[in-house]
Image: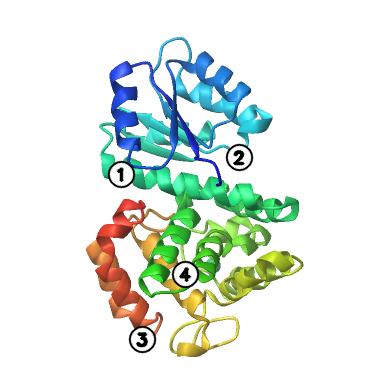
Amino acid sequence: MGLKPVVLVVDDGAANRELIGSYLSQIDCEVREAADGPNALASIEISAPDLVLLDVRMPHMDGYEVCRRIKAMPQGRLLPVVMITGLSQTTHRIMALEAGADDFMAKPVEAAELLARVRSALRLKELYNTLDGAEHVIFSLATAVEAKDAFTERHTQRVGESARLLGQRFGLRETELDTLYRGGIVHDIGKIGVSDSILHKPGPLDPIEWPQMQAHVAIGESIVRPLRSTSGLLPIIRHHHERFDGMGYPDGLRAREIPRVARIVSVCDAFDALVNDRPYRTRRSTEEAVAVLRAGAGTQWDPETVELLASELPSLQHVGAA
Ligand SMILES: [Fe+2]
């Protein structure tokens, strides 16, 4: 990011701002504060920060309204907003998402969780800062695909974070880590071309629907292919549904024929889907999810990646991926 990233902390309680500020001292960033919504909006107007940590319950203008107004500002569209609230019920979570918030945390805020979420949000902002116009379209499209489905909220970003983390543990180079992160975010971009009735079907797909769902990898590839700068992402987009035993799609690649980055994203994608609610089932515990992955290691998934993921659960928990 060159200069230090700027985090704007918006909370009517001075003690809360101070506490969050003290946590943030562990990250190389500049912290700004605002005591209410109007002051936050004025501060963003003067100079846009890289991230806003926004309290929900504030006098005069609540956090939802502040978030909506931020997202309506030209400089606010790609500015990540993480909402913090004492209310952890699903309705408040949905209200935060409807207001355009990028992430959501419940009080009391724990240092490790806050730091992981802030790092994750700043990484996404840094990614956006480096994109050219055409790439912006690609990543905005990927976000739009995700926004169609409240069940997959932040799913692709978690997949990107966890794929990058596993790549790091595998000792991959920085360029490959970048590919894993970006590929994790855009891997399902082709779902933009799949009808909602298929994407959201609560039961199994029929023989007519199934090929339409499978087409998302080829659709995704055709969306991204014209951009030279994103060519590293193509193997992930095309091959994230290959299976280790060669029974996957679209090319029936097996084992190490499947590009490694695609094998990693595929395991992270499956894991995150298992530990989060989906239209057709409720979430599993991390232990159950690992058991499912282990049962499918060597047939569906790359055994090496599955074992690495199992051993990295605590770190994955911090990126909100476990
Ligand atoms: Fe997919």
Toward the right, the furthest residue is 226
Q: What residue type is labelled 1?
A: Glu
Q: What residue type is labelled 2?
A: Leu
What quarter of the picture does the C terminus occupy?
bottom left
Q: Position of residue 94 (x, y in %)?
A: 44, 36
**Label 3 – label 4 distance at C-alpha:** 16 Å
- Please tell me whether mark 2 sits on a helix, a strand or a loop: loop
Pointer 4: what residue? 265
26 up-or-down from 279: above or below: above
Q: What residue type is labelled 3?
A: Gly
Q: Residue 250: tell me if it is visible.
A: yes
**Label 4 – label 1 distance at C-alpha:** 23 Å
Pointer 1: what residue? 113
Pointer 2: what residue? 78
Checking the image for residue 298, the label placed there is: 3
Which numbered disc flags the more N-terminal residue, 3 or 4? 4
**Label 3 – label 1 distance at C-alpha:** 33 Å
Q: Residues within 10 Å of mark 1 (few under 14, many from 20)?
A: some
Q: Look at 32% across and 30% down and name the residue there.
A: 20
